[in-house]
Amino acid sequence: MAVKVLVVDDSGFFRRRVSEILSADPQIQVVGTATNGREAIDQALALKPDVITMDYEMPLMDGITAVRTIMQRCPTPVLMFSSLTHEGARVTLDALDAGAVDYLPKNFEDISRNPDKVRQLLCEKVHTIAKSNRRFAAYASYSSSSAAPASTPAAGTARPTASASAGGSHAPAAPAPATSAAPKRKPYRLVAIGTSTGGPVALQRVLTQLPANFPAPLVLIQHMPAAFTKAFAERLDKLCKITVKEAEDGDILRPGVALLAPGGKQMMVDARGAIRILPGDERLNYKPCVDVTFGSASKAYGDKVLAVVLTGMGADGREGARMLKQGGAQVWAQDEASCVIYGMPMAIAKAGLADAVFSLDDIGRHLTEACG
């Protein structure tokens, strides 16, 4: 069955071009278009698409307001288009907070100069999002409260599933979360967290639960463009009790400080506790790459590393986790029920590399317990 897509953009050119690209895929059907947020809501309710592509800046109602309303009324995976600027990053992060699942750069020149690359990337994103765990009411709940740590459910509190709150075809019942035993304390020298699609909201959810005196340094690897990571680090720093900053070459690992890998580059750690920022290797699909950082952490700290793999498509982090496990480190994975995309954590679990599998709401608490 073809994936049904609603295309929302106030630009007639972009609306037509996106529709043409998607329609060229025999497994995708563009079922409608909209020119503003209000139309998008009406069309989403009427057409019940599997995926919505959404612009931000539109007349009558902007994309973020539309996403928030859609998540409340008919939870549907939304792919945002954004500009590769600091302001574009801020807007995109707002959209992800509102419930959007993923984003793509909105670059007219790329569409003209690299149509095949754009077509492949856009169609892959749509297919992956459509096949993802369609728990968008639950995801929207995570998103809407991610900026307010006090609203985090207490341990043991039942989370509403999408099926309970949405009641639509996009919200099948979520599988039960994993029930791994509580972790034992250990003097970890580093906590390394890798993630991709759904990661911005997931990281906010985890890091806002950590106390200001968290005793271990942290490194964060989020698949994200170069223009976005500084704005994301600034946002996390405002929301969290710990300190968060975009990593720079020569930064020193410090307890209670999280260093976010800069987009477009690779981040490594050494045994002296120093950060090395290297140019993005064109041979690697991801810049930054979770495997690269995990691998360097294994060499530097051996069994004194606690690694966590959160929501994301693909399998980045699996080989780095394998190296960590060989050195005696601990590896955790986010459970399927709380993932937006159960790809990266699934790769860890299927490879038998996960020492524990936890729900997103429990990871921050368990990190605090494990690190003492």
Image (tube, rainbow, N blue to C red):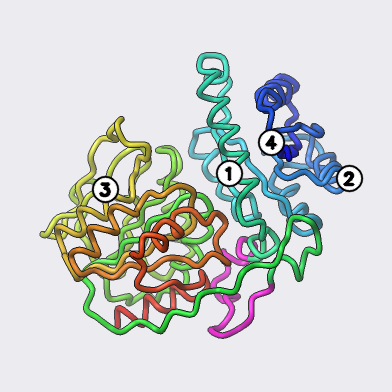
* Local crowd size for mark 1, using a 10 Å CA cut-off: few (<14), some (14–19), many (≥20): some
Say if residue 34 shows up in the picture. no
Q: Secondary structure at mark 3?
A: helix
Between marks 2 and 3, how big is the CA–CA gap?
Answer: 45 Å
Q: Position of residue 196 (x, y in %)?
A: 46, 50
Mark 2 belongs to which amino acid?
Ala
* Mark nearer the viewer, 3 or 1: 1
Q: Which residue is mark 4?
A: 57
* Mark nearer the viewer, 4 or 1: 1
The dot on residue 66 is none
Say if residue 369 shows up in the picture. yes
Residue at 32% of width from left, 80% of height from top?
370
Asked if marks 2 and 4 touch (Cβ < 8 Å), the reply is no
Q: Secondary structure at mark 4?
A: loop
* Mark nearer the viewer, 1 or 2: 1
Between marks 3 and 1, how big is the CA–CA gap?
Answer: 24 Å
In the rendered structure, does residue 24 fall within the stretch colored magenta? Answer: no
Q: Is tag 3's residue or tag 1's residue first in the polypeptide sequence?
A: 1
The dot on residue 128 is 1
Residue at 32% of width from left, 64% of height from top?
307
Q: Which residue is mark 2?
A: 46
Mark 3 belongs to which amino acid?
Val
Q: Is tag 4's residue or tag 1's residue first in the polypeptide sequence?
A: 4
Q: Is residue 92 left or right of residue 304?
A: right
Mark 1 belongs to which amino acid?
Thr
Image quadrant containing the C terminus: bottom left
Q: Is residue 322 left or right of residue 176?
A: left
Magenta residue span = 142-160
Residue at 40% of width from left, 38% of height from top?
226
Magenta: predominant secondary structure element? loop
Q: Is tag 1's residue or tag 2's residue first in the polypeptide sequence?
A: 2
Q: Is tag 2's residue or tag 3's residue first in the polypeptide sequence?
A: 2
